[in-house]
Amino acid sequence: MTSSPPAVLELSGITKHFGDITANRAIDWSLNAGRIYALLGENGAGKSTLMSILAGRYQPDAGTIRRQGRTVRFQSPAQALAAGIGMVYQRFMLVAPLSVAENIRLHGAAGRSRSDRQGASIRELAVRYGLAVDPDALVQDLSMGERQRVEILKLLNRRADILIFDEPTAVLTHTEIAGLFEVFQRLRDEGKTIVFITHKLEEVMAVADEIAVMRRGRMVARLAAADVRSQHDLARLMVGREIILNVDKPPAAPGETVLAVSGLSGPAGSSRPGFEEIAFEVRRGEILAIIGVAGNGQEDLAAGLAGLTPLKTGRLTFKGRRWRAPQWGRKPHEGIAYIPADRDRTASVGAIDLVENFMLTQLAVFSRALRLDRRRAAAATAAAVERFAIRGGGLKAPAGNLSGGNLQKLVLARELARHPDLLLAEQPTQGLDVRATEAVWQALLHQRAASAVLLITGDLKEALSLADRIAVIFRGRILDTIAARDSAAIDRIKLLMAGLETG
Amino acid sequence: MAWRIEKRAAGHGAAPWWTLPASFAMALAVGALIFALLGHNPVAAYGAMARGAVGSFYHFSEVLVRAIPLMLTGLAVALAATMLLWNIGCEGQLVWGGIAAAGVGLFVAPHLPEVLVLPAVILAGAAGGALWALIPAVLKAYLAVNEILSSLLLNYIAIIFMEHLYFGPWRNPEGFGFPGTAQIDEVARLPHWGATRVHLGLGLALVLALLLFGALRRTPWGYRVRVIGHNPQAARYAGFRLRRHVIGVMLLSGALAGLAGMAEVSGIHFRLQQGLAVGYGYDGIIVAWLARLNPLAVPFTALLLGALIVGGEQLQSSLHLPSSISMVLEAVLLFGLLLSEALARYRLVRRASAQPLRRQGEPTPP
Ligand SMILES: Nc1ncnc2c1ncn2[C@@H]1O[C@H](COP(=O)(O)OP(=O)(O)OP(=O)(O)O)[C@@H](O)[C@H]1O
Ligand SMILES: [Mg+2]
């Protein structure tokens, strides 16, 4: 320790095992007030586990935590919060039908102030930290960014001064990310401590004061952000080699049209605005990206095309067969593979093992007459685990034990293995580390040779790297479709995404 | 150094093996307390129960006799619960299985070639239970009516209807006013094992337990049932037909419970009469949970419960205790299981003690 102020939180020798896996191994780390820490590391490195230990969700098997010099042991998140440590999980923990104020009150200690006073103090906190959100709005009507602000307010309302964020930017749009970072800076200037996990190196460079890197359960580097010269250095620290996230995109050789839609609107039977008048076609051999700021209808569009929610109006032609929109979702369509954004609750089953998860959408492939062919499924899963370096627990481990990124890779590998005519990929690299992102991008480009790929993403870099054409969606409508080779179009895409220009 | 209880990491693993023995020990302890309060030496009481259950070949054969319907209803509950369906209606499905088996035995059998009689009775039993289960299944699948309530309420209707039959239209005209139907023919009865009352239903139940285990684990259908039970949203994503599975699983579950009723009629009573609906349907819930919904464990937990019931009856004759004591023990057993499952979420850790730090003026966390 140097002459810097005493640590507000000090970890020493923190170790955590899950069965045979050592998620955290003898971790030492100290956090100071008024700093922003970025925690980096490959998928499965143990970042979420370490943060969950700080936040009282897990107890370490060895090691101690000292809070302002005193040894503490948290049995529950409530105890950690009472000691001023709060965590915003990647999956927000809010009650959607309740208002913002009610959510915050729900989280507060029981029997505290009356609702009107609560409303006032929420507004006060919101103004002070630039967390604009209406206390009376219902959470279900809020965007992801606003929900995140509610989560932060929940913690501030409990007077937390160490705030932990697990991949907070994964669900946010560019503007929202900038807003979040401003909030980070204000909180830091008020003397709070921020720790955030991320896979995006440019975010680290943008906002962090301190950087910590984990690899395979160990803390392998701790350094001041000022000492880092480039993202390349960071990448090397993270994965042991340099990665520049650039994939070769050979020119597309589009074949026959696999899916064409026109006048599509949906979802039926819902009060949400959803999407309207959608028209596009996607051919075998090309990647069409639909890019948009989260919450502009692309989630509903993906679910509708995947047949999970009913479509309202419009026409579709899939592999030469014509459908009217209301008929589309009646039966699953042969030849469509869908990678949904929600990997935990939609795309996988936490309680069953990797092999069984690999069968989920390929039951017909892995069954013979009345029997499941587990042996063949295990071989296929093993190949996927190998190809995408899926780490954690082995084939017989429950999928729920996988780290976020590893689960995402498993889902991806499964859907690619189906050799679909149409691949619907929604946020396929969210939560993936650089190396895995590169591998997935390559896999998607490779898949392009055999399939029509519809990429739904909010990540401009991803769209530019992969897509042949980019359709920008805003408030449920596609404003324009732009050839990705047109490098002058980048600025235009940004403007379209923000709704500052019409198509 | 100090011992400390801490919550386990929320994992996806199964509960530890010791929950069943622990709940059994807990039930024994609470039972001992009850015996003591009733003024009986617990050791003597348990001795009497044990002798009653396994003291002789005959006694043990009686345990087997009870275990047969318990296995079948236990399998019925376990199958439905694997898909998160709560079939509380096994009692009514059992009754309908009995009615259908008796009906076929009494009125159809005379018109059938002999070799076909027993298969017809067995199939009728399964069909009777399945059809009764179809009602809550359809209500659930198409109208989202909670199956717990609907299947439970249907139990009372089934029982009253059965009583109506044997008090009324189906009553044995030569029965000297005794409420019950006439006996079914020899050919419509399940064969017995030697001089005991143990009948072919035992083999049937064991085979079905094996089949169900294999089907759930090794067939695409079983896979879909498990996935739906764990995560209906993922099942929908994978394109599984949820309604179809709700109905299919409820039909099968009802068929299993119906077979229990068939076995009682065609293996024990040989007629429809008072004493058919004695709660095996409800006991199946306990059997299934003690077995953690594993079909292979169901025969063992059914035996355990059968022993408890037979042993409890023995208390009545030897110590003049009310036979309902076995129901009390059953209930304690179930509570013990729930309790030890809750306890299994914690573990005992030995480490230097430390106080969680609390800031001044901060409320104590719950
Ligand atoms: N509840 C659990 N049970 C068993 N193993 C677990 C559990 N939680 C995490 N693990 C394992 O511990 C390791 C670290 O996981 P963790 O979630 O901390 O990784 P991470 O660094 O957050 O990765 P990602 O970037 O993919 O989110 C992984 O190998 C994971 O499989
Ligand atoms: Mg993580």
Image (cartoon, coloured by chain):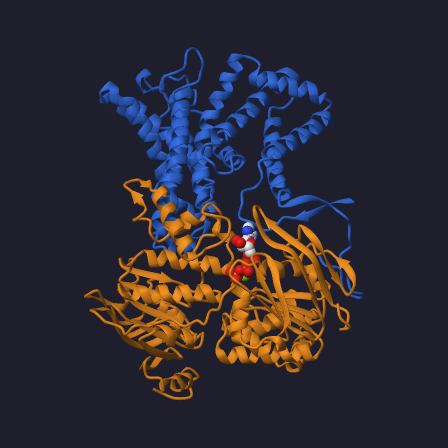
Chain colours: A orange, B blue
Q: Residue at x 42, y 56 (%)?
A: A410
> Residue A4, how many percent across, how many down?
76, 73
Q: Residue furthest bottom?
A: A501
Picture residue at 34% right of the left edge, 39% below the top? B131
The image quadrant where one finds the C terminus of chain B is: bottom right
Residue at 35% over, 26% down: B102
Residue B25 vertical placement versus A61 (above, below): above
Question: Looking at the image, is A390 positioned above or below residue A7?
Answer: above
Q: Position of residue B186 (x, y in %)?
A: 33, 15
Residue A379: % across, % down = 37, 46
Q: How many marks?
A: 0
Q: In the orientation shown, which residue stands out farthest toward the right?
A: B360
Vertical arrangement, residue A191 with respect to residue B52, above or below? below
Q: Is residue B4 visible?
A: yes
- Left or right: B57 as drawn, with respect to B7: left
Quarter residue B358 falls in = bottom right
Q: Is residue B182 left or right of residue A15?
A: left
* Rendering coords of residue A362 (x, y %): 33, 51
Residue A138 appears in view: no
Name, please, the residue furthest toward the top. B195
Identify the image quadrant of residue B250: top left
Horizontal side, residue A320 vs residue A59: left or right: left
- The quarter of the rendered structure image containing the N terminus of chain B is top right
Nearest the eye: B260 or B214: B214
- Does B300 appear above or below A297? above
Where is ligand 2, by quadrant? Answer: bottom right
